[in-house]
Image (cartoon, grey):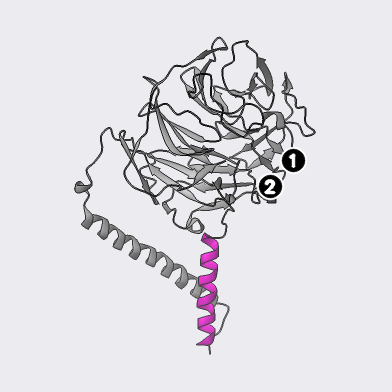
Amino acid sequence: MKTLLAVVLFCLINFHKSIFAFVPSGRGEHNAVLVDKKLYFHGGFRWAEGFAPNQLFYLDVSKTFITNDISLMPWTDLSSISGVTCKTGATACADESTIYYIGGSHSGGLVSKFDTISLQWSEPTTSGSIPTSPFERPGEEMKFVQCVILGHKIYAYGGFTNHKMNVLDTSKLFWSTFTSSLTYSMMQSYSATLLNDSILYIGGTFGSSDSCQTNSNQELPISMFNTNDNTWRMVTTTGQIPTKKCHHASVYIPQHNRILLFYGANDVTINSLDTLTFTWTIPVILNSGGPLRRLVGHTATLIGAYVLIAFGFYLTDEGVLISSDIFLLDVSHEDSYKWVTTYDPINSIQPIPASPTSPSNINIGAVIAGSIVGGIFVGMIIGGGIVGCLINRMNYVRLP
């Protein structure tokens, strides 16, 4: 009997380890890039501790998960891949199945790339008008900038003292630089969104300034860069215009023609910008469940009907706290959103509905029944796994 119990315990422990073997540590100033139903995280900083451990990992968004306990989420660690470098404050864009990491504080070169199919990390050599840095480590000039990809060209504007638009052609690994006397965007910690052939830049800071900047009218600075003729113009907005926004995260929801801005320095607000009328609003959030403190250095990623907000730094009166939190905002309805803790991959691939569904239309009985069936199904899987493990072990252990 003791031997049988030991075998059962062995199976349970290894069953648990095989599924929940990796849990990422909290961090800020990292990247999150979605490629083929996998959300790849790279880099990050742990404030006084330096670079975060586990520099490369992904979350499998083809599977259902809950955010209450991140140890139960389907993570996979890729940090042991040869050549993976440490980065913080870098920017990242995906060209098909390859992710390019540019700038930031790092242990590698200005540009790194990761092939998500071959799982190979490399430090490619680039040519052309390569952005330079006045610092010891190349790339820090381009810290806290945001990249946008159009075709095979990555646009990365600004930097510590840089007022240029830097463009990397990924097919040739060749840099081009565009300058203009009419540059309206801030230089760092802004958000960048591709709208057709133009890039919309919102908020940000000048150089190394930690505080958000405003223009002479005390309105949030917004500018547009046209990728066809490489020119800038100011964008006039109306509505509930934020006065400041920097070190925030943003997503573009094409189904609703809206850009959502999440938090930032001295800010606990979600702001919404209509990209057709350029009108600002404060979206209706139907429930509580998001961050209750100022959050910076986080990422926000649109995955179908959800926005996944990951990690970052909480700014408190007592100091800076490192966040290990994952939040999910359901944005399936145009006029109101809600916080949820369960991610359903079906909702991540279905079209977002045009109008909301009344809570009264929810079939509570079906939900309960589904939960029961799901529990039974999971129990069968676990039980089957244990039985299979027992059978295999009994081939090698003779019971008394």
Q: Among all residues in the image, which is located at the extreme bottom?
A: 400
Per the rendering, the mark at residue 365 is: none
User: What percent of the width, then of the height, locates residue 109?
Assistant: 74, 34
Q: Give the Cα separation between the discs numbered 2 and 1.
A: 10 Å
For image coordinates 50% across by 87% down, the residue present is 1
Q: Which element carries disc 2, helix, strand or loop?
A: loop
Per the rendering, the mark at residue 51 is: 2
Q: Is residue 128 above or below residue 314?
A: above
Q: Among all residues in the image, which is located at the extreme right?
A: 136
* Residue highlighted by disc 1: 107
User: What percent of the width, then of the height, locates residue 375?
Assistant: 34, 63
Three-letter residue code for mark 1: Ser
Q: Residues within 10 Å of mark 1 (few under 14, many from 20)?
A: few
Q: Which element carries disc 1, helix, strand or loop?
A: loop
User: What percent of the width, then of the height, locates residue 56?
Assistant: 62, 46
In this picture, residue 347 sits left or right of residue 109: left
User: What percent of the width, then of the height, locates residue 22?
Assistant: 57, 57
Q: Is residue 241 above or below residue 224?
A: below
Three-letter residue code for mark 2: Phe
Which is closer to the viewer, label 2 or label 1? Answer: 2
| CB atoms of marks 2 and 1 within 8 Å | yes
Work out whether mark 2 precedes mark 1 in sequence or the reverse, and give the earlier one.
2
Q: Main secondary structure of the magenta part?
A: helix
In this picture, residue 139 sits left or right of residue 340: right
> Quick one: 74 or 68, which is closer to the camera?
68
First to last magenta residue range: 1-20
The quarter of the displayed image where residue 100 is located: top right
Q: Is residue 323 magenta?
A: no
- The number of discs equals 2
